[in-house]
């Protein structure tokens, strides 16, 4: 299957899509903007974030959270960004992805090295920021943690390990801590980036080097593949019925070429099952 419908183009580097309040919100890392996009293709810059990388999600009571460096920021009513939690002690180089579950627990992750600067490899980690803004590191030794999702019953956190070529799952305890680490899906030679969950228990993952977005079942069976003409960085289910798959894709020529050309697009395709879980 080929995704042909382009909802937006000219993006420098799109990441972290979220369906929220009837629009697709995403981060343009190079432009340092949070953008909200409606289904008619109208876009609005809703925040500026001086960080690369950064990611967004929402607390159950409404405020948007933003990862920035080793801090978790919170958008105030006037649109300013305040420090929600300082994670300077985290072993990750910088915070990458965030997902907030239905109980207000925010899970954040980051790689253990600066890939963009060509630093030596070190494994990454996942941390928890509780609803009262306390932080604790939970899970290390993940080769390159990327997209994350929490199942609808708040029982399982799934982490895309791009270098490990798998989706890794953790059981979520009543206090938000993680246990029972296991491989949720072995993806063979694929490199998962952003992910989302659907109501049939499948995961969609974006793959940059293989230029595709794949729907996979627990255990690794590939259920559907959407081929794209450029690298797929992230995906999210949304729309009025929750069954529109939004794909953030752009040309990838390595860290040295980031920001030199605005090849980023938001693509749309219809999915067989609607969104479930978080984000």
Image: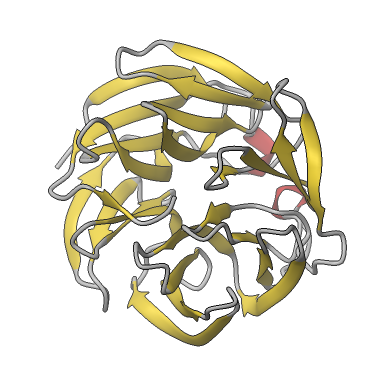
Residue 210 in the image: above or below residue 40: below
Viewer can see residue 135: yes
Residue 153, horizontal then vertical, whole percent: 35, 67
Residue 26 location, x and y as percent?
A: 51, 32
Q: How is the image coloured?
A: secondary structure
Which quadrant of the view contains residue 179?
A: bottom right
The one of 83 and 212 positioned closer to us in this rendering:
83
Quadrant of res 61: top right
Q: Residue at x 65, y 80 (%)?
A: 141
Percent coordinates x, y for residue 269 in the rendering = 21, 35
In the rendering, at what x and y percent does residue 249 appear? 41, 35
The vertical placement of 217 against 68, above or below, is: below
Q: Nearer the viewer, residue 178 or 50?
A: 178
Can residue 122 be spotted in the picture?
A: no
**Residue at 46% across / 57% down in the picture?**
102
In the depicted structure, whether residue 260 falls above or below residue 93: above
The answer to whether residue 184 is left or right of residue 110 is left
């Amino acid at each position: 299957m080929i995704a042909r419908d382009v909802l937006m183009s000219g993006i420098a580097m799109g990441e972290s899509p979220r369906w929220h309040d009837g629009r697709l919100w995403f981060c343009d890392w190079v432009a340092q903007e949070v953008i909200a996009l409606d289904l008619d293709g109208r876009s609005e810059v809703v925040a500026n974030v001086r960080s690369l990388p950064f990611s967004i999600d929402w607390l159950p009571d409404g405020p948007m959270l933003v990862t920035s460096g080793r801090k978790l920021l919170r958008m105030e009513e006037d649109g300013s960004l305040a420090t929600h939690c300082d994670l300077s002690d985290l072993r990750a180089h910088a915070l990458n992805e965030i997902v907030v579950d239905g109980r207000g627990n925010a899970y954040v992750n980051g790689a253990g090295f600066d890939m963009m600067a060509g630093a030596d490899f070190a494994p990454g980690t996942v941390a928890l920021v509780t609803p009262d803004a306390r932080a604790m590191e939970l899970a290390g030794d993940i080769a390159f943690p990327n997209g994350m999702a929490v199942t609808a019953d708040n029982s399982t956190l799934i982490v895309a390990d791009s270098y490990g070529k798998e989706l890794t799952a953790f059981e979520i305890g009543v206090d938000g801590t993680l246990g029972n680490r296991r491989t949720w899906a072995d993806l063979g030679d694929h490199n998962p980036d952003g992910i989302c969950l659907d109501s049939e228990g499948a995961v969609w993952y974006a793959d940059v080097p293989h230029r595709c977005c794949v729907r996979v079942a627990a255990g690794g069976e590939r259920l559907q593949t959407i081929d794209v003409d450029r690298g797929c960085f992230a995906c999210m289910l949304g729309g009025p019925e929750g069954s529109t798959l939004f794909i953030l894709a752009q040309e990838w020529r390595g860290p040295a070429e980031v920001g030199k050309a605005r090849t980023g697009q938001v693509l749309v395709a219809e999915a067989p099952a609607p969104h479930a879980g978080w984000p």
